Image (cartoon, rainbow, N blue to C red):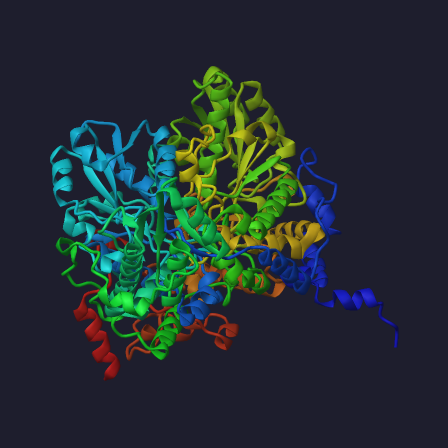
């Protein structure tokens, strides 16, 4: 037997070959179909020579999983996870293990995509409508969306929503100085582009101001609980809209914002079982009165019916306004926080109303007991009415108390040089409180929690005691045993299609493998239990990982600096445009306000430009889908004096490398503008080209696409912004760098105001999932990242070549080749057969596939992106399905199938339809459910038929279905 070299044995479980789907033999077989000799020669044809990078990425070589996990563990060990009582919207929480294992760590949930195809998303849509119902019930308001990015950005969204509905003629938004400081900072950043003046002060004076909106914190950031009824009425009487940032857990005990009269409520659901994670990701919420629902930012899940009249969930009211209103949009929200919203909703489902009340009462009792002990130690409390946060006048003892706390590995909030605050949560124990008393009173303090708790007085105003019911729907009152919860979660995930079942061929969304090894560190306590505003010397490991990831992203993109703060791609766009704006202003050219954007651009591009106060001018595209250089030249010359930027996606939204990109960048620079290159399609660029080197000035990246953070059913996302050196000073600043910021300001040590404020609440955005991308880069190494790009391009061209005889490929580049995705044109088919792109998308469900991207960037088309993770076997399975569907369409064209009653028009076919006693269609049951023999081996049955979108928009219902519906289902199940 031939001796195998030891190095080959070591590399047997190499990660690269586990991540990249097609083997070397499969790659050669696909190249043969393309009539190309090698993968490198294919890339030479696809990628323009003027931008091609021939040097290997200056990154370490690929490593296998054990050493990468060991390296992350070593960084995690450098973090010091103190017991944090810092509050400010971030709290310790107990994640029920049944939710941890079966949602957060379950690929059926974390690899799913945004539920734009409702028939294959009923499970996560139900979970989201539970979330909406939970928020609506607890806040006492009519309707809630399906999550926003964090509390601070939710407040900013509420500000612009308030401006639309306010009757007052004003541009002033009043923010209570009792709000969380990071919320105030983000609102100030967002307000500038809209011409809104933010006034921060004592909310009691707001009634004397001419304002369009008021933001209140309930309870206050430093703990105080205030009855705002009279203030709300007074402000509303002057035509202003009232927004309340409310702690959701406290609302189990306190009168909710809706009953106090507030118009809008916002906040975070982090403490509902979602770890702090050094700042995120967490699901924020926004609830409002019914009158505001059609302007509600973000996503909204509603109840409709399917084609059999059965209840079915769907995204409703077209709330992603950036795709409709584009440059007139007031929000660029695209990503939600679905996975975290599911966790928070399930936390409420698992505990139920009585469980939430018990937890809230426990937290409040612990805080009241702590306060009583402090009084016995001689301390004065700044406020006697509080929920979970105790504000203490420490005066000359402040420094000693902080020293004692540090010695005990405890963080308390330093509000100013004479005042400290302590926020408790459901993880705070009796022993923790006794230790805190020693921190404040000295090591010899011997107070007994049990004894003091007996005499502790209540800390909630009686006038604000909640009397209304909440979470009354059966879904919140049935699944309290682990058995019931486990089965409920399984029943929901079984309804959906995610990457754990099938390829998701969505163009522009890059649904690639999220390897298990990359996911493992997310739940390590060294990462998950870190408070975002803990002192910096406690997060050394986190910051080491973040710095390393930033350097890697700079090398990959060719840029000079990166900020990981933006917690979505759209937020990255916003941050990039803020940087361009600040750069122009710093050079005395603040008048530059024109942004040129191709007509094919993603809707967030014009929305982001508009949000910083710039004006959008649309550039035409030519017949091949490329930027019309002649039109661009004309417009650049026309607006030369005021040109701020060009926003361009590369490779193009149509999936093609445009040869003129270098000339385009040069043209914009010639006229004094900056080039914003949208990084949504970076999966076709990594290792073969560098935007920062071929002319772009700034890009956002989608770590939830190219760098393997999973989509989680529509979020979390991370959208870091990368810039060349001249824009680096204008990256987003951090709202708070550590818990002592407020004290530093009080002592006169505050630094100068930054050029650009923060765009997210936490200093590093959704830091809790950055380990995923760090691990992906380390596992793939320089060679693996480049190989992934090449195979992604190969897979896309293989699909395009195989399907070209059956479906027109709308756009292609040189030699008929494409980048990482292709657009199938279904419009000619509709003319001949009546079959639309949507019909094809629904019919794919019967074949067990998620549909490609529907009608974007061109209406009536399907955009397909296979990624590098899919093997030739899976690509062929998808191709066979598409060819079979084309044959069905041909049968309609030839009159063999009825134009109106056929498998495509009636798709998808449910088990209920297939088992019906009568069958009224000309085609067979087998053709409906098993159009290809291979489907019989693993059939996916959609839980509902085609969902009626028009009915859903006309009959808006966005909370759990009525009790009668639910009870009927239970009766039928029992029978």
Determine the image quadrant of residue 396: top left
Give left or right: position of 95 versus 802: left
Q: Where the C terminus falls, by quadrant?
A: bottom left
**At x 41% / y 64%, what residue is drawn?**
896
**At x 41% / y 52%, what residue is drawn?**
837
- Furthest toward the right, the residue is 2
User: Where residue 345 appears, x then y in whole percent?
Assistant: 33, 62
Is residue 88 shown to the viewer in this render? yes
Is residue 879 shown to the viewer in this render? no
Q: Where the N terminus falls, by quadrant?
A: bottom right
User: Where residue 532 appears, x then y in whole percent?
Assistant: 46, 49
User: Where residue 372 appears, x then y in whole percent?
Assistant: 27, 58
- Furthest toward the front, the residue is 444
Is 916 above or below relative to 283? Answer: below
Give left or right: position of 569 versus 778: left
**At x 52% / y 28%, what residue is drawn?**
628
């Amino acid at each position: 037997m031939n001796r195998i070299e030891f190095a080959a044995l070591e590399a047997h479980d190499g990660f690269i070959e586990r991540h990249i789907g097609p083997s070397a033999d499969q790659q050669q077989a696909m190249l043969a179909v393309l009539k190309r000799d090698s993968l490198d020669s294919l890339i030479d044809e696809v990628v323009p020579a003027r931008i091609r990078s021939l040097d290997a990425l200056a990154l370490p070589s690929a490593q296998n999983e054990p050493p990468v996990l060991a390296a992350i563990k070593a960084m995690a060990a450098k973090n010091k996870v103190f017991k944090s009582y810092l509050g400010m919207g971030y709290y310790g929480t107990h994640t029920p293990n049944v939710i941890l294992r079966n949602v957060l760590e379950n690929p059926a949930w974390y690899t799913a995509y945004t539920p734009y195809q409702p028939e294959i998303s009923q499970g996560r849509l139900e979970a989201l409508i539970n979330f909406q119902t939970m928020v609506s019930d607890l806040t006492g308001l009519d309707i809630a969306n399906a999550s926003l990015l964090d509390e601070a950005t939710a407040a900013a969204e509420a500000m612009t929503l308030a401006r639309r509905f306010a009757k007052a003629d004003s541009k002033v938004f009043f923010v209570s100085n009792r709000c969380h400081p990071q919320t105030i900072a983000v609102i100030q950043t967002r307000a500038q582009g809209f011409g809104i003046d933010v006034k921060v002060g004592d909310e009691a004076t707001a009634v004397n101001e001419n304002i369009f909106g008021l933001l209140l914190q309930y309870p206050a950031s430093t703990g105080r609980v205030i009855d705002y009824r009279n203030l709300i009425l007074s402000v509303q009487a002057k035509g202003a809209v009232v927004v309340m940032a409310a702690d959701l857990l406290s609302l189990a005990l306190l009168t909710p914002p809706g009953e106090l009269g507030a118009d809008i409520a916002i906040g975070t659901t982090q403490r509902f079982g979602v770890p702090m994670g050094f700042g995120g990701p967490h699901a924020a919420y926004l609830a409002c009165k019914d009158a505001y629902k059609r302007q509600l930012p973000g996503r909204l899940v509603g109840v409709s019916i399917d084609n059999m009249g059965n209840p079915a969930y769907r995204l409703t009211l077209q709330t992603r306004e950036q795709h409709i209103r584009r440059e007139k949009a007031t929000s660029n929200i695209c990503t939600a926080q679905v996975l975290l919203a599911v966790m928070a909703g399930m936390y409420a489902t698992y505990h139920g109303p009585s469980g939430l009340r018990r937890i809230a009462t426990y937290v409040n009792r612990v805080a009241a007991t702590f306060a009583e002990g402090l009084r016995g130690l001689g301390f004065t409390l700044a406020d006697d009415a509080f929920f979970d946060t105790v504000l203490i006048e420490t005066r000359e003892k402040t420094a000693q108390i902080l020293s004692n706390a540090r010695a005990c590995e405890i963080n308390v909030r330093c509000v100013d040089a004479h005042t400290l605050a302590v926020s408790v949560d459901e993880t705070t124990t009796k022993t923790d409180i006794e230790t805190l008393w020693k921190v404040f009173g000295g090591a010899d303090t011997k107070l007994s929690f049990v004894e003091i708790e007996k005499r502790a007085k209540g800390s909630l105003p009686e006038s604000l005691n909640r009397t209304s019911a909440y979470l009354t729907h059966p879904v919140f009152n049935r699944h309290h045993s682990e058995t019931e919860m486990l089965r409920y979660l399984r029943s929901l995930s079984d309804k959906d299609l995610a990457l754990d079942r099938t390829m998701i061929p969505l163009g522009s969304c890059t649904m690639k493998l999220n390897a298990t090894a990359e996911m493992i560190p997310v739940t390590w306590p060294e990462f998950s239990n870190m408070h975002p505003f803990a002192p910096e010397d406690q997060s050394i490991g986190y910051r080491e990982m973040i710095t390393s990831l930033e350097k890697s992203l700079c090398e990959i993109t060719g840029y000079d600096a990166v900020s990981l703060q933006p917690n979505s791609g759209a937020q990255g766009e916003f941050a990039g445009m803020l940087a361009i704006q600040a750069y122009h202003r710093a050079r005395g050219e603040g008048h530059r306000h024109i942004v040129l954007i191709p007509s094919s651009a993603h809707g967030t591009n014009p929305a982001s430009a508009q949000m910083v106060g710039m004006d959008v001018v649309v550039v035409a595209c030519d017949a091949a889908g490329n930027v019309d250089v002649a039109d661009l030249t004309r417009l650049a010359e026309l607006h030369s004096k005021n040109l701020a930027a060009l926003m361009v996606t590369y490779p193009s939204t149509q999936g093609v490398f445009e040869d003129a990109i270098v000339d385009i960048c040069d043209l914009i620079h010639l006229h004094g503008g900056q080039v914003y290159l949208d990084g949504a399609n970076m999966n076709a660029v990594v290792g073969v080209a560098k935007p920062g080197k071929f002319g772009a000035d700034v890009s956002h990246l989608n770590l939830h696409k190219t760098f393997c953070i999973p989509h989680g059913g529509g979020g979390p996302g991370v959208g870091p912004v990368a810039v060349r050196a001249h824009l680096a000073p204008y990256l987003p600043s951090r709202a708070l760098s550590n818990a002592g910021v407020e004290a530093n300001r009080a002592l006169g040590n505050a630094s100068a105001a930054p050029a650009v404020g923060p765009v997210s609440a936490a200093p590093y955005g959704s830091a809790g999932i950055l380990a995923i991308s760090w691990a992906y880069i380390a596992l793939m190494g320089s060679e693996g990242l480049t190989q992934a790009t090449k195979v992604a391009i190969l897979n896309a061209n293989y699909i395009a070549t195989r399907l070209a005889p059956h479906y027109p490929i709308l756009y292609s580049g040189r030699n008929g080749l494409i980048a990482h995705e292709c657009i199938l044109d279904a419009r000619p088919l509709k003319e001949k057969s009546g079959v639309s792109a949507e019909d094809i998308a629904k019919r794919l469900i019967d074949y067990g596939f998620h549909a490609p991207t529907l009608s974007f960037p061109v209406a009536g088309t399907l955009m397909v992106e296979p990624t590098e993770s899919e093997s030739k076997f899976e690509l062929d399975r998808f191709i066979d399905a598409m060819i079979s569907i084309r044959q069905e369409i041909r049968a309609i064209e030839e009159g063999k199938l009825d134009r109106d009653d056929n498998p495509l028009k009636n798709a998808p076919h449910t088990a209920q339809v297939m088992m019906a006693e009568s069958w009224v269609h000309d085609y067979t049951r087998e053709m409906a459910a098993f159009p290809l023999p291979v489907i019989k081996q693993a059939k996916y049955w959609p839980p509902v038929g085609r969902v009626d979108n028009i009915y859903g928009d006309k009959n808006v219902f966005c909370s759990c279905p009525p009790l009668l519906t639910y009870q009927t289902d239970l009766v039928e199940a029992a029978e």
